[in-house]
Amino acid sequence: MLFQFVPEPKTVKNRVHLDVRTGDDDPQALVERLVAKGAKHLHEGRQGPSAWTTLADPQGNELCVSH
């Protein structure tokens, strides 16, 4: 997947929400790497056996890292 910067500002809510599954990788390490690259930690979530961390990229688009 490629994301490209454009000169015009974002004017509406993004309709894409990524849910990143880490597989055998450490999800907390991935969250820390994304935050170091400019993501903002928003909150932690849990439903039944599933857990995730919600982040926002520098433009405010949300994504989740599933544990």
Image: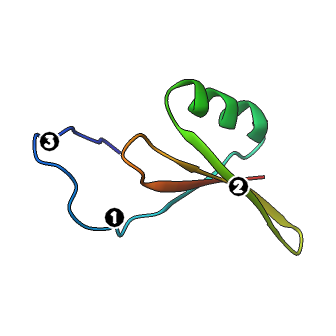
- Cβ atoms at labels 3 and 1 below 8 Å apart: no
Q: Quadrant of residue 32?
A: top right
* 7 in relation to 56, above or below: above
Q: CA distance from mark 3 to mark 1?
A: 14 Å
Q: Quadrant of residue 54?
A: bottom right
Q: Residues within 10 Å of mark 2 (few under 14, many from 20)?
A: few
Q: In front: mark 1 or mark 2?
A: 2
Q: Which mark is residue 14?
A: 1
- Identify the residue at horizontal 62%, vertical 27% (top origin): 33
Seen as rendered, the residue at the extreme left is 7
Query: Where does the image place residue 25, in percent across and percent down from the top left?
Result: 75, 36
- Type of residue at label 2? His
Q: Which mark is residue 43?
A: 2
Q: Secondary structure at mark 3?
A: loop
Q: Residues within 10 Å of mark 1 (few under 14, many from 20)?
A: few
Q: CA distance from mark 1 to mark 2?
A: 19 Å
- Type of residue at label 1? Asn
Q: Secondary structure at mark 2?
A: strand
- Identify the residue at horizontal 50%, vertical 56% (top origin): 62
- Identify the residue at horizontal 52%, vertical 37% (top origin): 39
Q: Which mark is residue 6?
A: 3
Seen as rendered, the residue at the extreme bottom is 48
